[in-house]
Amino acid sequence: MSDAKVLATANLMSKNVGLGVFLTLFFGGLGLLYANILWGVIGVIVEIVLIIVAVFTLGLGLLLLIPWHIITVIVAMNSIKNHNKRLLATL
């Protein structure tokens, strides 16, 4: 396979950090599924639990969603960067 084809294939298989951050910011754990399936599932479960806690604490549990949201964005960025590094290492 020529170098151009290898780079084109790597470009098609790589993930965009900006898109991952955007999806995670606006969709939380569901957006994190783009970056990493395992962390996405964990994110969705934690967000559901935090929403249930928020209901029983009359909204005080929503304060926990803010740091969790920041953590998911950081996880998305790191997961995508690691994915792209592994992809380039296999070429």
Image (cartoon, rainbow, N blue to C red):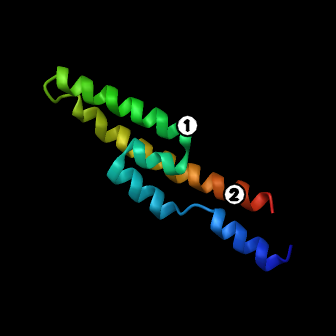
Q: Is residue 6 left or right of residue 76?
A: right
Q: Quadrant of the N terminus?
A: bottom right
**In the figure, 81 relative to 43: above or below?**
below
Local packing at callout 2 (Cα closer than 10 Å; few below 14, some 14-19, many 20+) is few
**Mark earlier in primary sequence (2, 1):** 1
Q: Secondary structure at mark 2?
A: helix
Query: Seen from this angle, which residue lies furthest left?
Result: 58
**Gap in angstroms between the C-alphas marked 2 and 1:** 18 Å
Q: Position of residue 89 (x, y in %)?
A: 78, 58
Which amino acid does the dot numbered 1 rest on?
Leu
Q: Is residue 6 left or right of residue 22?
A: right
Q: Quadrant of residue 7?
A: bottom right
Q: Are marks 2 and 1 in contact (CB under 8 Å)?
A: no
Q: Position of residue 24 (x, y in %)?
A: 40, 51
Q: Position of residue 37 (x, y in %)?
A: 55, 41
Q: Secondary structure at mark 1?
A: helix
Image label count: 2
Which residue carries the number 1 mark?
38
Q: Quadrant of the C terminus?
A: bottom right
Which amino acid does the dot numbered 2 rest on?
Lys
Question: At 77% from the left edge and 75% from the top edge, which residue is drawn?
Answer: 5
Q: Is residue 61 left or right of residue 1?
A: left
- Name the residue nearer the viewer: 70 or 34: 34
Question: At 65% from the left edge and 62% from the top edge, which residue is drawn?
Answer: 13
Which residue carries the number 2 mark?
85
- Name the residue nearer the viewer: 4 or 82: 4
Q: Quadrant of residue 88?
A: bottom right
Local packing at callout 1 (Cα closer than 10 Å; few below 14, some 14-19, many 20+) is few
Q: Is residue 31 left or right of residue 55?
A: right
Q: Position of residue 33 (x, y in %)?
A: 49, 46
Query: Seen from this angle, which residue lies furthest right?
Result: 1
Question: At 57% from the left edge and 60% from the top edge, which residue is drawn?
Answer: 15
